[in-house]
Amino acid sequence: MQRRKLLTLTPAALAAAQQAPQPVKPPQAPAPAKPSNYRTSPIGYSDTPVLPGQPWKVHDIARPRPAVVTPGPRPGDPPSDAVVLFNGRDLSAWTSSKGPARWKVENGYVECVGRTGDLISREKFGDAQYHIEWSAPALIDGDSQWRGNSGVLIMGRYEIQVLDSWDNPTYADGQAGAIYGQWPPLVNPCRRPGEWNVYDIFWQAPKFEANKLVKPAYVTVVFNGVLVHHHQEVTGPMAHRAVRQYAPHAPEEPLALQDHDTRPRYRNIWVRRLKPYDQR
């Protein structure tokens, strides 16, 4: 009878043998070869003229390049540098002019329930890009200013009107997309009641020095993809049947959504802070 030899392993060798085998990484594909007609170009210059009003030369190689921002996966989705104020789930980014925020959240939108106060963002903004989607109630229960009336109150006081302006005559500077009480929109691209509208608002805040206005606010508004205000001067805060003058305020103030005792809905609200060229 043939005697078999027993293999004795040390504890370390036994532990090593019991370990799961490591996966073998596939070899990386080589970088694609450059085609024979591949062309190169200088990434900048240092021997060009200085640009008027700027410290930089034309195509200046030393000029800082723009920061990389990842766009949202779908049109209207927030880009990577946006502050998301409403994510479709809760009102944690908001308070109210009457205490805690009490608008109704469901199905990815927030609905004004009336007489609970304006929604007021906890964060404050100055120069900014705003993206706001809204819809007026599908059930029409009034006319003129009682059809889904609300407002986007930039810095809490400068209003871009929200209203059901589909087949609903009202005063021109009070319809959807108006700078309320000041400038009507260039055109009326409002969708039917119950359908979603989109505002993209580009805001330049007013500037004050020693409690005096040195530069008014300017706004550009794109309404459902249609330009309705192009770098339009804002003459002062929102007012009904009156004209209000500018009053000094902080460089950054909250965004507000107006409770006008009707039931509009909002969704997909985000903001990007904008810096002047000399601060980038």
Image (spheres, rainbow, N blue to C red):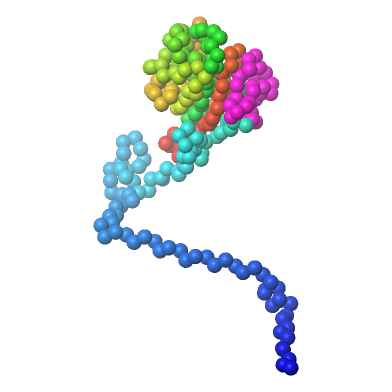
Across and down, in percent, residue 109 comes to 58, 27
- Which residue is at 62% across, 32% downward? 89
Q: Is 70 above or below relative to 118?
A: below
Percent position (x, y) of residue 134? 52, 23
Quarter holding the N terminus is bottom right
Left or right? Give the position of 64 relative to 268: left
The answer to whether residue 44 is visible is yes
From this viewpoint, which residue is outermost toward the front?
1
Residue 256, magenta (yes or no) = no
Please identify the quarter of the rendering in which residue 226 is found: top left
Q: How many marks?
A: 0
Comparing 114 with 4, the one in front is 4
Magenta part, dominant SS = loop
The C terminus sits in image quarter: top left
Q: Which residues are magenta?
A: 90-116
Q: Give the image location of residue 148, x and y in percent.
A: 54, 14
Q: Residue at x 51, y 35 (%)?
A: 78
Q: Residue at x 40, y 63 (%)?
A: 30
> Which is nearer the eye, 177 or 209?
177
108 in the magenta segment: yes
Which residue is found at the position 45% from the left and 14% from the top?
A: 166
